[in-house]
Image (tube, helix red, strand yellow):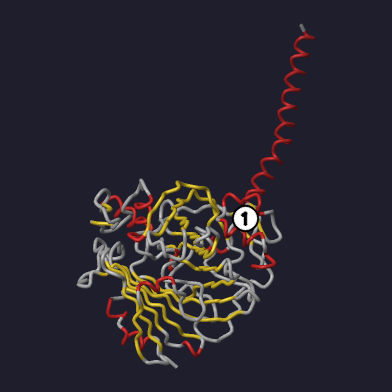
Amino acid sequence: MELLVHNNQEVQDMKRWLSRLFFLLLTPVVVFGVMGEAMAGKRVPIDGAGWPYPWKDTYSTWGPGNQEFDQKLFDQDVMESYGWKAKDVEEIKDMLPVSMYMILKDPDTWGPRRINVSEYIPPSGELWDKMKAATAKFKGTAKVDETGWIRNYTAGTPFPEPKNGQELMWNFKKRFHEDDRLLSVVTIITNKGGQVRYQTSDGNLMFFDGRLVEGDKYKFEPNPQNYVRIDIYANAHPYEMQGTLSFIAQFDDPSKQDIFWLYLPAMRRVRHLSPAQRTDRLPGGQDLMWENFDTFNGNPTNYNFKMLGKKKMLVVHNGTPTGEWIEGKHLAGPNDYYQKIDVYVNELTPKDPDFPFSKILHYTDPETYAAYYSEWFDKKGNPYIFSCFQYAPSKSGLYIPVVMNHVDMQAVHSTGYAATNFKYNVGLTPAYFGVDNLKKEYPAR
């Protein structure tokens, strides 16, 4: 009996000893596991990346304008990196547009570029809440007519569950956006030999529907011209382009052509342009056309659409708010944070057989419907013009395109844009876009 008790006591002691040993062995795993997560990798700088702007003026440094950003956006934890001095982009080839893959695979031609994968941060903020409320309020009211034009649209996402490419395109055209903006950018034009020309310009605009700032006043009124959007692209530098103005007005009428005009200070007159010139490049040798402004700025009735579904892609949804570039190398934003998102892919084919492109692939966010990429293919089906936008969400909920790139893949020529001191929802009216007022806002030399 005494032996049995003694043996039972030894067993209990052994169990307690093993339990303590297991706890001691487990503790470092838990502790170091937590530490490993907290100490996730940080973005490694790329030599030469910065803000090498040549003039001393309001564009000479980055500034947030009238927007505020969460500090965590500036220094995000990096889960993995691909491209320049990082993992092989072959591992993520299926999550990139063809053009972006080509750029990343050939740094000798295009320059260093890296994709830093960070955590996806969902949309939030006061204006995003208003966007969701407007989508719910007007759900089911918007329709696409037999011409392919949207009718009865007021605000919000017109087709929360798009059934086809037409509805998907109209979700992009009526995406989550500001009421108006003054967007100052440094424009970096780089040729095949690495020679750089700088411009400074403002891309200012005003929307007439889908407005969210003033409560339930979703449309700007009065609007006797039936505008849906007005844009002005105004140059401040270089000296010889100072005061050059490019204007476009779009209407809520599929039968009414957009109005284009160009003000050239040297000629001191307004030159009206034909809608056929939509695929002409903007002044100063840029790779931007009015047709691919904002990745796509065409009239939807001029295209056929095919929704290819959703695809997991690497995109800059919540990137760093500060743009940068490497002088002499192509594309701004070479070292940004990317997130994995199931984006919509839309295929556009022009109805006009003489249109200089055979098709366009358009990649949009499944919630905001902002566009991350567009690829324009030549008549033989080869990559030609590539656009990529990199966003940073402000505390208000707006997604600021802090970096934009338009690239001529065949000429090895690019135009990068780095935004600074941007001002959103400042209360612009149609009077601001009158030529006499714009000449005062952007005086010539």
Residue 137 in the image: state x and y as whole percent.
26, 51
Q: Nearer the viewer, residue 28 or 103?
A: 103
Image quarter (top left, top right, bottom left or bottom right) of the C terminus: bottom left
Residue 360 spot, x, y in % from top left: 46, 58
Q: Quarter-wise, where is residue 44 in the image?
A: bottom right
Answer whether residue 341 is visible to the viewer in this image.
Answer: yes
Q: In this view, does 398 lie to the left or right of 136?
A: right
* Residue with the most extreme front position: 353
Total marks shown come to: 1
Kind of residue at badge 1: Val
Q: How crowded is mark 1: few (under 14 residues within 10 Å), some or many (20 or more)?
A: some
Q: Quick one: 47 or 273, which is closer to the camera?
A: 273
Quarter placement of the N terminus: top right
Picture quadrant of residue 440: bottom left
The residue indicated by pointer 1 is 78
Q: Can you tell which quarter of the image residue 384 is in?
A: bottom right
Q: Is mark 1 on a helix, strand or loop?
A: loop
Is residue 395 visible to the viewer in this orientation of the structure? no
- The residue at the far right in this view is 3
Q: Is residue 79 left or right of residue 264?
A: right
Residue 162, position as x, y percentages in the image: 36, 48
| Relative depth, front residue between 58 and 310 | 310
Closest to the observer, 419 or 307: 307
At a point 55% along the width and 81% down the height, the residue shown is: 198
User: In percent of the image, x 50 and y 47: which residue is there?
Assistant: 311
Q: Where is residue 424 in the image (x, y as percent from the top left)?
A: 39, 71
192 up-or-down from 116: above or below: below
